[in-house]
Image (cartoon, rainbow, N blue to C red):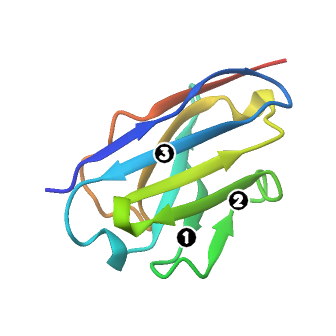
Amino acid sequence: QVQLVESGGGLVQAGGSLRLSCAASGRTFSRYRMGWFRQAPRKEREFVAAISWSGDSTYYADSVKGRFTISRDDAKNTVYLQMNSLKPEDTAVYYCNRDPPSIPTWGQGTQVTVSS
């Protein structure tokens, strides 16, 4: 079963940056489109960004377009999310999964807190 481990979150001031990483187990990582998702307190989990299996195409939620960049390193079975110009409304637990999500067990996520 594929396991997902997210890391890189933390507390940052508005306008700051963070780089999240998600390491996936298994030998089929490179075959799938991968995505980042987030869940803020008392809200539903939402899509943030995705990258095609080839890495040639990327997709972003309107709320993060121009500020976040998703990338992948298939040799390391890892997907990244570079987050710049962070805003308090970006505060959430961030998760990765295939896009659309098909790995049944989500990772623990990584907390991102942006102070104003």
Mark 3 nearby-residue class (10 Å; few <14, some 14–19, many ≥20) = many
Q: Quadrant of the N terminus?
A: bottom left
Q: Give the residue number, with chain letter if any, for mark 1.
A: 51
Q: Mark 3 to mark 2: distance in Å?
A: 18 Å
Q: Give the residue number, with chain letter if any, for mark 3.
A: 21
Q: Mark 1 to mark 2: distance in Å?
A: 12 Å
Q: Quadrant of the C terminus?
A: top right
Tell me if 42 is positioned left or right of 65 in this view. Answer: left
- Work out whether residue 45 can be spotted: no
| Picture quadrant where residue 87 is located | top right
**C-beta proximity under 8 Å, tags 3 and 2:** no
Q: Is residue 32 above or below residue 46?
A: below
x and y, in percent, of residue 101 in the image: 38, 61
Mark 1 or mark 2: which is in front? 1
x and y, in percent, of residue 18 in the image: 66, 36
- Work out whether residue 101 can be spotted: yes
Q: Secondary structure at mark 1?
A: strand
| Disc on res. 61 | 2
Mark 3 or mark 1: which is in front? 3
Q: Secondary structure at mark 3?
A: strand
Q: Is residue 50 above or below residue 104?
A: below
**C-beta proximity under 8 Å, tags 1 and 2:** no
The kind of residue tagged 1 is: Ile
Mark 2 nearby-residue class (10 Å; few <14, some 14–19, many ≥20) = some
Q: Nearer the viewer, residue 41 or 79?
A: 79
Q: Mark 3 to mark 1: distance in Å?
A: 14 Å
Of labels 3 and 2, earlier in sequence is 3
Q: How many marks?
A: 3
Of labels 1 and 2, earlier in sequence is 1
